[in-house]
Every structure is written in structure tokens, then in C-alpha cells.
Amino acid sequence: MNRKNFCGRKIGMTQVFARDRVIPVTVIDVFGWYITQIKKQDVDGYNAIQIGLLRKKYAKATFSIEWLKKKKHYFEVLHEVCLPVIDESFVMGQLVNLSQYCSPGDYVHVSGMTKGCGYAGVIRRHAFRGAPASHGHTMGKKPGALSFMRSRGRVIKGKRLPGQMGNDLRMMRNLEVVKIDNEAGIIVVKGAVPGKSGSVVFVQKA
């Protein structure tokens, strides 16, 4: 398997005691991935393995080879890993524990989709202070003057205005791996990672 990057599911945040201090950490579940397809050089033109993460409602079910015929129905995420050589030990439907490809002390980049907050105004989206709430001010939560080109029907690029908040791809770099539980298939990284609990994140070794 590729030892440099893999996917997981964010469980949530907690804190652990290490080096005589409290460290805020995020727990990522990297267990429950099945080999759904094996690609070889002589057939497909390159060597790769496709792994899939089961949907939550099938997570506790016994694996069936019939699942591979309807991958989009049973698997939430399909991730392809290119390999220089295909190991003969890889078998279709094999359960893969990705926690073995990381060790405490390593640094990783974790990317994911941030929480979607819908349409938000400038005070929530950009932390604008807003106008005074007394002395007859009627501005409310409006963004204020748009630009000096507004009379010509144009607004400066990058102007902070109301709009969609969140639901963006973001990456947190150089997060330390604090702890690994190979039996449970989880890794614990220092700090926060993008996304809400239960969302899929991509882990890349720094």
C-alpha cells in the first residue's frame, strides 16, 4: 500500500495528557476500508489498488462479494492508490487497516471539506463589527460602502460581502501524530482538522 497518503473518517476532538501537559487532539478512524478493485499493468496499463469505505448503515454488516457489483450503493468513498508492484497478498474484499502506515511522531497534512453554514451575512462570515446600535443608526447588519467604482456598476475584486459560508476544501499542515491504536484502527493527531464529525478526510504524510 502507499505509505504516504490515505483517507479516514473524522470521529471528533478530545484531549490527551502527554509530556506533562494537556494536548487538544482530533481522532481519525482509518479502519473499515475494503479492497474493491485490483488493477495490473498488463490489463489496465498501470498498477493500482482501489479501496472503498463502507457507508455507515453497512459498517457492521458482514462483507459480501455482491457489494462489488454495486459500489456506489454500498461504499461512500472510493480511493485509488497507485503502486509500483502489486503484492500477491492483496485479495478482492480484503479488509485494510491503514493505521499501520503511520507512527507516533510523524507529521501529516489533513485536508477535508469544512462545515457548511449556508448563506451568511458579513458579521458572521467575515466578523464585521457592524454599526452602533444606538443614536438613530439605521444601517443594521449591512456591509456598508462597496467601493469607489460602485457608481459605474462595478465592485472591487475580493470585496467581503454576504454569501456562502463554509463547505470549502481546506488543509491543515504539519499536524503531529500523537497516538495510534492499531487494534481499533484510529490515529490521533494534534490540533483541529477541517470538517464535522463523521466526514471523510484525506491524510498525507509531510
Image: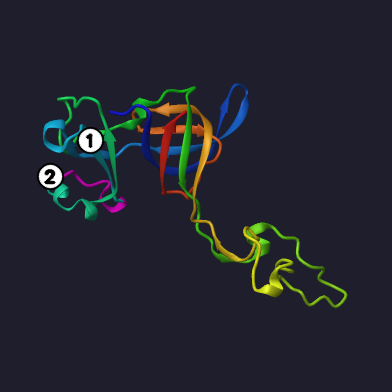
Say which element carries label 2.
Answer: helix
Where residue 49 is drawn, which disc sits there?
A: 1
Q: Which residues are magenta?
A: 56-65
Q: Amino acid at mark 2?
A: Ile
Q: Is residue 41 magenta?
A: no
Which x, y percent locates residue 19?
60, 21
Specify which label sits upstream in the sequence, 1 or 2. Answer: 1
Quadrant of the rendering where the N terminus is positioned: top left
Q: Which color scheme did the rendering employ for the protein?
A: rainbow
**Three-letter code for the amino acid on which mark 1 is drawn:** Ile
Occupied quadrant, residue 186: top left
Label 1: element kind: strand
Magenta segment, prevailing SS (helix, strand or loop)? loop
In the picture, residue 91 is in which quadrant? top left
Mark 1 crowd level (few <14, some 14–19, many ≥20, 10 Å Cα): many
Residue 152 image point, x, y percent: 68, 73
Observer-nearest residue: 104 or 184? 104
Relative to 195, 48 lies left or right: left
Say which residue appears at 36% left-offset and 35% top-offset.
Answer: 6
Query: Whole-percent x and y of residue 31?
Result: 32, 37
Please tell me whether residue 190 is drawn above or below residue 198 in the rendered image: above
- Where 183 falls versus 124 (above or below)? above
39 w.r.t. 70: above or below: above
Q: Which residue is mark 2?
A: 65
Residue 53 relative to residue 161: left or right: left
